[in-house]
Amino acid sequence: MLRARDAYRTKKGLLTSNEIATIRGFYGISQSDFSTMLGWGDITVTRYESKTIQDETYNNIMIMAYENPMFALDSIDKHKKRFTIEKYNKIRNSITHKVEELGNLYLKKQEINVLYVNYQQD
C-alpha cells in the first residue's frame, strides 16, 4: 500500500514517504520532533511516512523546512516551549549548523529566482 501511495504522491508532485524521511534526516530529528518543530500534532509526520497522504499545504511546509534552514530555525524557535530545553538545544544546534553550511546557497538561489521572475516557462 505504501508503494501505491508513494506512486500517487509522485504523480501529484508531493513528497514521498522516503523524501519526508530524508528531510528529517537532513536535520537528524525524529518524526515526532519534526512534527513538533513545525507546530503539528506529534504523530502527523509518522502518518505521512507510513499511511496518510499529506495535503499540498503540509507538503509545501516540509519542503520549505528542507530548502530554507532559516525557516526551520524560525519554526523551532516558535515552538520552543513544546520541547525540553535539552531537546530544543540539540535540534536548534543541528539546524543552526545547516544555516551556517547552506544559508548563503539558499540566498543565492533566491537571488537568481528574483532575476528571472519575469521569464515564463514553456
Image (cartoon, rainbow, N blue to C red):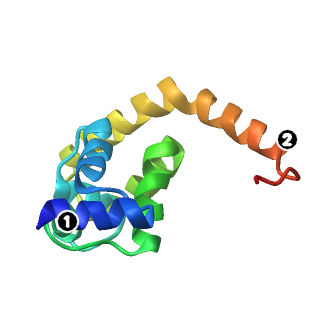
Query: What residue lies at 45% left-to-right and 72% top-to-bottom?
Result: 56
Query: In this orientation, which residue lies closer to the viewer: 48 or 76?
Result: 48
> Would you say residue 79 is visible in this rendering?
no
Query: In this orientation, which residue lies closer to the viewer: 23 or 30?
Result: 23
Query: In this orientation, which residue lies closer to the viewer: 116 or 114?
Result: 116
Image quadrant containing the N terminus: bottom left
Residue type pointed to by label 2? Leu
Left or right of 14, for residue 84: left
Up/down of 97 relative to 59, above or below: above
Query: What residue lies at 42% left-to-right and 67% top-to-bottom?
Result: 12
Residue 44 is situated, as x and y percent measured from the top left of the image, at 22, 70
Query: In this orientation, which residue lies closer to the viewer: 2 or 112?
Result: 2
Name the N-terminal-most of marks 1 and 2.
1
Residue type pointed to by label 1? Ala
**Residue identifier under label 1:** 4
Secondary structure beneath disc 2?
A: helix
Toward which corner of the image does residue 82 lie, by quadrant? Answer: bottom left
Up/down of 55 relative to 98, above or below: below
**Residue identifier under label 2:** 115
Residue 113 is situated, as x and y percent measured from the top left of the image, at 75, 43
What is the spatial separation of the Cα atoms under label 1 and label 2, in whole angstroms?
39 Å
Q: Which residue lies furthest to the right in this view?
A: 118
> Would you say residue 23 is visible in this rendering?
yes
Left or right of 85, for residue 62: right
Query: What residue lies at 43% left-to-right and 57% top-to-bottom?
Result: 75
Residue 38's tag is none
Up/down of 95 relative to 84, above or below: above
Residue 115 is situated, as x and y percent measured from the top left of the image, at 85, 41
Q: Residue furthest front?
A: 122
Query: What residue lies at 31% left-to-right and 39% top-to-bottom?
Result: 27
CA neighbours of label 1 inside 10 A, class few (<14), some (14 to 19), many (20+): few
